[in-house]
Image (cartoon, rainbow, N blue to C red):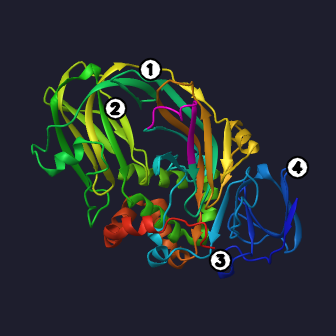
């Protein structure tokens, strides 16, 4: 049991952004408790402290300095401005932190360009470490916890059947990783396994495009190979929902045995919009996130509507002179590219594929057509056999990642290497399946832009809000990539 002492504060006062002042408990019934002198009773799953209650309208309804005891199960979200190097409450509780410490210079120059990563998995190959997986990028609250499956570039272990991958928290975020599994499909010569429509497919005969929009120019070269030379466009200065289409031509393919491979990642548009929305919400972020956790329809509708309006990559094929939609790609994340397979499943041949997307939202590395030789493959599912925390193996962490009711909770600077045991001497197409969610730390610089009217627009008229945000994003679009990467968390900044 730990105990820390803080002064009490009004929930929406200016003092609420001063470090070491408060603990706010957002309750399942809509009430709010603000407490000091708290204790965390892990054994009995409760928080004990001294403070007072506010009702749903945030009117104080009890005297200050009364004893308050709250069960974990009655609390949907904990809010504070502490930021120690560990989860300060309990892995069982979702926490939102207001961060007032030292940040990188690029982040000070433009707080909306601050690095944000969600859990990112890296592979070490010789002297090179490369990002492979950006896990559950859109899972920004516990209610949005999701499972993510991503293909890895490596096909075998270290020669002794051991496969290692490192997951890092490189931003001012708290990550809640419920599980990480390695999915292995035996490799067959001259073929590859890819994931699409919740199934695994074996493919071969990967064919690049022969023209884009009827031209054989530099744009075609960007689409032809998976080489990190990406096609992307600039956003529309007046409307972030403005669309563009690219018509990609291939040699004739049979629809019922073909698939479309698309390797992509997002631009920083959604990162900017997410951070800007948090800035406008300001000190009310905790209230709004708690409302989401309590399944408030108006909050959930706003979040889903913004992503629906921006949209994913809509994929169509031209069959019998008609464009027919065959799938879409909506997975978010600006860091690690991933490849999606869209099976055609049509009894007709085609040679043209059309991609439609919001301008400036997607960065596309490759588009190809392939032959599907096998469907609905069953992978070998492997759990981690060990977890290393900055060079030291921790058996407790290994148990957490195989316990469906627990989370590995990490804060900025965390780095964990997971080991899996593969059958020796065999090669596999490997995928990582991860499940969890994360919460973003609120930077003190953002609170200067707190704006109730803009917050109402986000929640009630997101399409209008996206039009208002178009020229604002345009001002920083050109420099965001450089600022974003140079503001990555450095664990020695404190």
- In percent of width and height, residue 342 lies at 34, 32
- Mark 4 → mark 1, Cα distance in angstroms: 45 Å
Task: State the residue at coordinates (44%, 68%).
Answer: 486
Give the labeled residue for mark 3. Answer: 17
Q: Residue 389's mark?
A: none
Magenta part of the protein: which range?
Answer: 154-166
Does label 2 or label 1 sit earlier along the sequence?
Answer: 2
Residue 211 location (% of width, % of height): 13, 41
Residue 376, numbered label: 1
Q: Is residue 354 above or below residue 493?
A: above
- Circle 4: element type: loop
In this figure, which residue is indicated by the disc labeled 2?
342
- Cα distance, mark 1 to mark 3? 52 Å
The residue lying at 45 percent from left, 69 percent from top is 112
Q: Is residue 312 visible?
A: no
Q: Earlier in the sequence, mark 4 or mark 1?
A: 4
Cβ–Cβ under 8 Å for marks 3 and 4: no
Residue 225, position as x, y percentages in the image: 26, 42
| N-term mark: 3 or 4 | 3
Q: Nearer the viewer, mark 4 or mark 1?
A: 1
What residue is disc 4 on?
44
From what the image shows, is residue 448 above or below residue 140? below
Q: Nearer the viewer, residue 484 or 121?
A: 121
User: Crowdedness of circle 2 by 10 Å Cα count: few (<14), some, many (20+)?
Assistant: many
* 73 part of magenta stretch: no
């Amino acid at each position: 049991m730990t105990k820390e002492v803080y002064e009490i504060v009004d929930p929406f006062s200016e003092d609420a952004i001063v470090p070491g002042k408060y603990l706010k408990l957002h309750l399942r019934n809509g009430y709010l408790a603000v407490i000091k002198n708290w204790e965390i009773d892990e054994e009995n799953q409760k928080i004990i402290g001294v403070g007072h209650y506010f009702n749903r309208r945030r009117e104080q309804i009890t005297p200050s300095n009364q004893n308050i005891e709250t069960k974990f199960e009655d609390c949907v979200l904990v809010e504070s401005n502490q930021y120690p190097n560990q989860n300060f409450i309990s892995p069982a509780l979702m926490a939102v932190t207001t961060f007032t410490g030292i940040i990188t210079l690029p982040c000070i120059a433009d707080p909306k360009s601050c690095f944000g990563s969600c859990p990112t998995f890296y592979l070490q190959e010789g002297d090179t470490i490369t990002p492979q997986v950006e896990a559950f990028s859109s899972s920004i609250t516990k209610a949005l916890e999701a499972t993510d499956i991503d293909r890895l570039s490596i096909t075998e272990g270290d020669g002794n059947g051991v496969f290692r991958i490192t997951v890092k928290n490189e931003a001012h975020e708290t990550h809640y990783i419920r599980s990480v599994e390695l999915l292995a499909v035996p490799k067959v010569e001259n073929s590859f396994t890819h994931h699409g429509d919740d199934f695994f497919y074996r493919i071969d005969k990967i064919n690049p495009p022969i023209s884009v929009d009827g031209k054989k120019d530099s744009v075609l070269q960007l689409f032809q190979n998976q080489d990190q030379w990406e096609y992307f466009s600039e956003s529309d200065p007046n409307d972030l929902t403005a669309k563009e289409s690219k018509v990609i031509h291939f040699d004739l393919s049979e629809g019922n045995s073909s698939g479309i491979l698309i390797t992509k990642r997002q631009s920083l548009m959604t990162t900017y919009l997410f951070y800007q929305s948090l800035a406008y919400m300001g000190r009310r972020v905790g209230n709004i996130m708690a409302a989401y956790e309590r399944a408030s329809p108006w909050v959930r509708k706003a979040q889903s509507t913004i992503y629906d309006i921006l949209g994913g990559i809509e994929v169509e094929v031209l069959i019998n002179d008609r464009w027919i939609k065959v799938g879409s790609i909506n997975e978010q994340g600006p860091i690690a590219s991933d490849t999606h397979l869209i099976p055609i499943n049509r009894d007709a041949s085609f040679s043209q594929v059309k991609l439609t997307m919001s301008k400036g939202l997607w960065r596309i590395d490759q588009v190809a057509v392939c032959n599907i030789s096998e469907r609905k493959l069953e992978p070998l599912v492997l759990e981690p056999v060990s977890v290393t925390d900055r060079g030291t193996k921790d058996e407790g962490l290994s148990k957490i990642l195989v316990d469906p009711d627990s989370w590995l909770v990490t804060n900025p600077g965390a780095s964990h290497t997971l080991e899996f045991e593969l059958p020796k001497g065999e090669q596999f197409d490997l995928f990582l399946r991860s499940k969890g969610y994360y919460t973003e730390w609120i930077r003190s610089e953002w609170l200067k832009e707190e704006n109730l009217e803009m917050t109402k627009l986000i929640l009630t008229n997101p399409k209008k809000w996206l039009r208002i945000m178009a020229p604002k994003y345009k001002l920083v679009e050109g420099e965001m990539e450089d600022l974003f990467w140079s503001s990555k968390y450095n664990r020695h900044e404190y």
